[in-house]
Image (cartoon, helix red, strand yellow):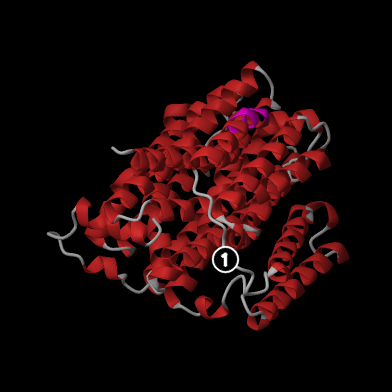
Amino acid sequence: MGPEDQNRWTALFVLCMGSLMIVLDTTIVNVALPSIRSALGFSATSLAWVVNGYMLTFGGFLLLGGRFGDLFGQRRMFLGGIALFTLASLACGLAKAQDFLIGARAVQGLGGAVVSAVSLSLIMSLFVQPAERAKAMGVFGFVAAGGGSIGVLLGGVLTDLLNWHWIFLVNVPIGVAVCALSLRVLPAGSGTSLDGRLDLAGAVTVTTALILATYAIVNGNQAGWSSGQTLGLLAGAVALLGAFFMIESRVKVPLVPLRMLRLRNLATANMIGVLWAASLFALFFLSALYLQLVLGYTPLQVGLSFLPANLIMGAFSLGLSAKLVMRFGIKPPLGVGLLLAVGGLLLFARAPVRGHFVADVLPSMILLGFGAGMAFNPVLLAAMNDVDVHESGLASGIVNTSFMMGGALGLAMLASIAASRTSHLAASGSGHLAALARGYHLAFLIGAGFALIAAVLGAAGLRPAEVAAFDDHEATPSTVEPVLADRGL
């Protein structure tokens, strides 16, 4: 391996470290949620904003972050995103008030969006040979999936041995190291000239619309679902979404070209992504609360409980998902994966107050690990099947944005439903733990419904992708992985 090759693989290591920070922050928080709730006095529904504050800005600025990278240089934006994420992590770790923590989480999401948007572009520019690109993408994907396992374990260890502040403070030394190494090994591109207007108006309107809608749902129980506040916020969200589509139809360089939303597979994949994420994000959020508040698990025990699902998802990211797609096409792995997730959610919907890990938690985690591992890549590949190769990154970004937004709205809604059900049962005389468990049961049941609808949409709405045309003799790792890598997987 020559010096140039060594530098490229060192650069990949740096990019993976940056990605690891983002993934860690997504999973490490779930384990500490009950501790954060107790320390800062969050209610059961407002606690969702610790997650939603991050997801909304992450999803809202994911596409704009990629556009900034094209215009101002990928390395420059990667460094800026890491620096912003690191400073926001420090602010989260020092937070002593609810609003301050939620605000810092929102800034974290902005930094994370920029890092995520430009990391894949940097990999594509560093590794131009299909075989090397496939290998690099596999390593990057494995780190992203493996980071979930590290996050739940590290969250449990830090919360148990120290306190919840350290789940954020751990990002600071990693961020400083990534910034220092980036200046040495990442290529310093200058970007393109500002030949088109930045679609700031589009990013602001769509993000504000989703924030208003999520706020209305999160506070629906307290304000009343038919109150002027709730209906007014929802009406404002609809008006802003209308303004967003009007802006996108008129600007020279839109954030989301509307012609792409008319593509059948891309549109279907977007709907699947919203529903799938609504069930998945709510599952991990609410199951962490169930394990701690109902079963009495410590944060470390919660982290260990999530480990089987994350390990299975990591194994699929190393190539199992790609091989299934090439062997059976897109629709069968997607449908089977979503149905396995439905089964896992239904099992959680019956988890008792005095549940046991082996009988009541582990089967659900295994089914959800297989389901998420099988279904995620087919959704992305289906989205990119209708677009040219040079637009595959944008198509992937659109689906990722839908996934993040669906997760935020689904989490807000299901957390609110669970809290409402629990309050109603408690007022009717049910015991505290029984009321909590049955509130979570209803949310898990609705989440299973979301995943089931997504499976039906995939079966009915997706056209067979061109990769499904490979026969058994062609479906080998040497031919499969470069195809997936060239399509952004």
Q: Quadrant of the C terminus?
A: bottom left
Tag 1 secondary structure: loop
Residue 468 in magenta stretch:
no
Q: Residue furthest bottom?
A: 250
Q: Residue furthest right?
A: 228
Indicate the position of residue 21 as horizontal and vertical percent values.
Answer: 56, 38
Say whether residue 267 is left or right of residue 94.
left
In front of the other: 35 or 198: 198
Q: Tag 1: Cα neighbours inside 10 Å, few (<14), some, or many (≥20)?
A: few
Indicate the position of residue 266 as horizontal and vertical percent values.
Answer: 46, 71
Q: Main secondary structure of the magenta part?
A: helix
Q: Residue at x 49, y 38 (%)?
A: 14
Q: Residue furthest front?
A: 3
Q: Is residue 244 visible?
A: yes
In front of the other: 172 or 373: 172
As shown in the figure, which amino acid type bears the numbered disc 1? Thr
Residue wearing tag 1: 192
Indicate the position of residue 15 as horizontal and vertical percent values.
Answer: 49, 42
Q: Residue at x 52, y 42 (%)?
A: 19
In front of the other: 75 or 225: 75
Residue 171 in magenta stretch:
yes
Q: Is residue 360 visible?
A: no
Instruction: Count numbered badges in the picture.
Output: 1
Q: Residue furthest left?
A: 473
Q: Quadrant of the N terminus?
A: top left
Say whether residue 302 is left or right of residue 434.
left
Indicate the position of residue 396 as horizontal and vertical percent values.
Answer: 47, 62
Whether 22 is drawn above or below 258: the answer is above
What is the span of residues highlighted in magenta in the rendered image?
169-174
Say whether residue 120 is left or right of residue 431.
left
